[in-house]
Structure formats: structure tokens, C-alpha cells
Amino acid sequence: MSLYAIGDLHLSFGSDKPMDVFGGGWNNYIEKIKDGFSHLCAEDVCVLCGDTSWGISLEESLEDFKFLNQLPGRKIILKGNHDYWWATAAKLKAFFEGNGIDNIDILHNNCFVYRGAAVCGTRGWLMDGEADAEQNGKIMAREVSRLRTSLESADDSLEKLCFFHYPPRFKNMVCQDIIAMMNEHRVKNCWYGHIHGYGHRFAVQGEVEGIFYKMISADFVNFIPQKIM
């Protein structure tokens, strides 16, 4: 029984946005995902760090969820910037139950306990150069609040692991409020996705000021869920 993580699967069984059109590592990516998950067993857990489905509604994403449901292991999903299907936790749970999706849980203002550790997280935010300072500030404050709620829902006796869609650090950008919240709760490890292609070379990896950062975008890790513990 192990814990894994991967981000940015960009499934599109119910929509017409196959990632194969980008070529390179995305060629035949569905088969790569199947092969990557084949190393997991039913008792394993995998955190999916956002951008799971291109569907713009739950109905359009249903075939993507059915595909995930058939892969080995339990999945914990958090929101990415392209997850337009995302809804309230209650609506997501009801939709999954109504469609026989029985091995997907939702990480949103909560945490999950796994072998003495707490799986915590939120989407996060990269400052949008096209948005004004006020809008950026509101979005960041909302994400920090959600991260706080997630971290505070975990018992302090547990090691707290953080998962994001957006990187807390990228190039010269630093999300100080998110990092401060991790420091307040003594988080030592975090995982994130979102970054693709040329952006890989600018990803922050390794320890920076006491926190160890790991990028797990699917195309960066060759579509293989990364073992955490």
C-alpha cells in the first residue's frame, strides 16, 4: 500500500481535445497513462494534481472519470485551472455515486489521512499578468484560505504533505502567502503540476528554504505516478 502523485492527465474521452496533437512526449499518452498506473495495486492511493479532464461539464467529463475509475488504486483529485467541470464537493460526490465512480475522492477544504501523514492542498495560484493587482490579490487570498482550511483539518501530530496544481515557486515568482502558510504548519514537502514543455526547464525542484519541491506534471514524469511513501 503506497501513496503516489501525478498531475495534468488532460483526459478528453468526452471532448475533442486530445493532447496527442502536441506531439513529443504526448504521443500515445493514454496508453502511457495506462502503463504508468499498471504499477499500482488496488490498495494504493494516487493524488491527481489538477487538469484531470478537458470536459466543460461533469457530463462531458464522465467518460474520463470512468477511465480513471478503471485504473488501479484510489484517486484523490484537486482542481486545476482547466478543470471547468469542477463543482461543489457535494455535487461531485453525488455525481460520482450516481455514475458508479467509486474510487475517486475530492481534496477541497479538507484532508485525507494516509499512514501517519495528512494529504492536504488546493489549486494554488500564479499571478496573472493580464489581471489587475486587486483581482490577483482576491484569488490568492481565496487559495490561501482554502490551504489553511485543509491544513487545519489535519491533526498536528501528523506529517502534513501539500499538493497543488500551480507551483508555489516558478522562475523568479514566489507565492509568499502560500509558502508562509506551509511554514506555519511545518510542511516540508510539496508536489505540483501545471508546467509543460519548454517551461520544465524553469521548474523549481529540490529544497528551498526548508521546503522540498517536486514537479509531477504528467509529461515531465513520463506519465508515471511518482511514489511518495
Image (spheres, rainbow, N blue to C red):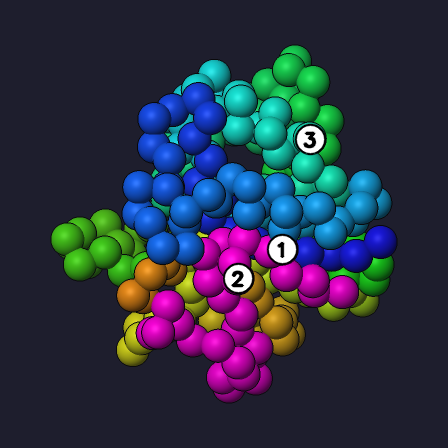
Report the amino acid beneath label 1: Pro
Report the amino acid beneath label 3: Gln
Quadrant where the C terminus sits is bottom right
Q: What is the distance, in whole Å, between disc 1 and disc 3 at their CAs?
A: 15 Å
Q: Circle 2 is placed at which residue position?
A: 221
> Where does the magenta region start and end?
200-229
Q: What is the distance, in whole Å, between disc 1 and disc 2 at their CAs?
A: 8 Å
Q: Residue at x 53, y 22 (%)?
A: 63
Q: Circle 3 is placed at which residue position?
A: 70
Q: Would residue 66 appear left or right of 20 to someone viewing this image?
A: right
- Figure quadrant of residue 118: bottom right
Q: Position of residue 201 (x, y in %)?
A: 35, 74
Report the amino acid beneath label 2: Val
Residue 216's place in the image compared with 212, above or below, is: above
Q: Which mark is residue 82?
A: none
Q: Position of residue 213 (x, y in %)?
A: 53, 73
Q: Position of residue 139 (x, y in %)?
A: 33, 50
Mark 2 lies on a secondary structure that is loop
Tell me, yes or no, whether the two marked residues, 1 and 3, touch with CB atoms within 8 Å.
no
Mark 3 or 2 closer to N-term?
3
